Amino acid sequence: MTDTASMPAPEKIPFWRNPTIRACGFQAVMLVGLVLLALVIYRNTLANLTLRGINTGFGFLSNEAGFGIGEISAIPMINPGFFSFVASAMGVALGLFLLFRYLIQAEGNGKNRFMLGAGVVLFTASLGCFYTSISMVETYTYTHASTYVTALVTGLINTLKVSVLGCVLSTILGLFIALAGLSPNWLLKKLAHAYIEINRNIPVLMHLFFWYFIVFQRLPGVRHSASLFDTVFFNNRGVYLPRPVFQENFALFFVAIFLSLVIVFFLWLHGRKRQGETGKQPPVLIPCLGVLIALPALVCLFTGTPFHFDYPVLKGFNFKGGMTLTPEFMALVTGLTVYVSAFNAEIIRSGIQSVSKGQTEAGRALSMSEGRIMRKVILPQALRVIIPPMTSEYLAIAKNSSLAVAIGYPDLVSIGGTILNQTGQSIEVIGIWMTVYLIISLLISIGMNWYNAKIRLIQR
């Protein structure tokens, strides 16, 4: 038997050979080197700007812009009314969340009863604050006398409008194309395949040029506009639509619609719960339609019409009244939608095909229709495969919207370029571009990753 006391003590390893210490040391040296390099670049940049007499800083943002923007949107003013509106909206959302959790976990214990009471109180109080604060939110629009900050915010709103519409429309169109590609109909399948192969192999900039110069710029002139029921007009200057003009009682009408949607949601949730407990589906469609129609109708009956429409009318050389969708806006949204929908269709198709065929056969064995199998069985499981690559396509839409400058749409990049040419503050303007697009991309990634985590398959 070996005597452990007589064994030599293990040799102590020098600290510079310790893998952990060496790894931390190398990273610290790399970090110090990067900081020093950034300081050198910063000092050289300041020296070169001073040598050429170029001022630095963001003080120019408060100067008068003095140029026009072809497409402007209302910008909410940051005041106490705006903060009250945001706080009340968050309270309504939190109250709905508590009520939703109660209906999911309704067991009658003290914790769930407290959750129900807190949800009802918070929702009711926040809804009252929401109704009173919605009329306190003031907006303003860009004019020639506005500052550069207002111009950049207007460009940001235009960018967000295109990005959100592009994400929604490309997803819907991609879903239809994917289902057509999986159809047993030979012609429909080939048409979907041709759509995908053609659109995703054409550069996105060519898509924008095609829709702007070949399609929307070739529409008839103003005096020969195509019309739809004499209320919607199409010409090479855009699409002219009726514009709703809100009355003083619109806030109450909006709250009534919101309440009806909440009631419909909880009716639907209660129907699902009853179906899971008893196996029988209670009538939900007729009560939901009744709530959606009755509550807003009662508000209109007692308070009057909440809005009326301002219709576009041809006067002189152009239409007056209504609202206008410019050719640049339509070309940008259409081009991005068509281009990205081809990629989304392939993503959705691969996600659907990743679900085992046994799931479809089990649904058919239960006498479920093909549409119900797709909605209730296949797509919920396919989302786990669809969401991660779909996130990249949403990011591509947000970033490719910067190509709007090629067709004259006043987005953030286009307006920023005008400001850069007027002021010469290239570093500041480019820094604003990079920061804004970084924040947009991070918000999209965070939201999609959160949703992906909610629907992931949890292994037991």
Image (tube, rainbow, N blue to C red):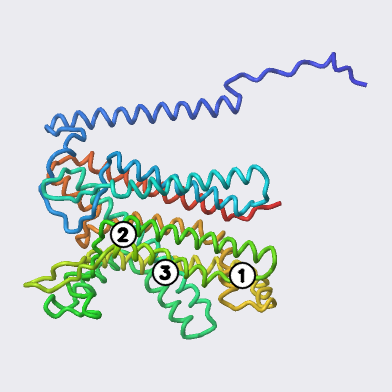
Residue located 68% across and 45% down the image:
109
| Among the 4 quarters of the image, the one containing residue 65 | top left
Residue located 26% across and 67% down the image:
331
Q: Which amino acid, mark 2?
A: Val
Residue wearing tag 1:
282
Crowdedness of circle 3 by 10 Å Cα count: few (<14), some, many (20+)? Answer: many
Residue wearing tag 2:
162
Front residue of this view, candidates 128 and 197: 128
User: Where is residue 445 shown, x and y percent of the image?
Assistant: 45, 50
Q: Nearer the viewer, mark 1 or mark 2?
A: 1
Q: CA distance from mark 1 to mark 2?
A: 41 Å
Q: Which amino acid, mark 3?
A: Ala
The tag earlier along the polypeptide, 1 or 2, is 2
User: Where is residue 259 shown, x and y percent of the image?
Assistant: 44, 58
Q: Which amino acid, mark 1?
A: Pro
In the image, residue 114 sits, relative to residue 45, either above or below, namely below
Left or right position of 46 against 295: left
Numbered-mark total: 3
Crowdedness of circle 2 by 10 Å Cα count: few (<14), some, many (20+)? Answer: many
In the image, residue 397 sits, relative to residue 200, either above or below, namely above
User: Where is residue 115 shown, x and y percent of the image?
Assistant: 58, 45
Left or right position of 223 against 323: left
Residue wearing tag 3:
342
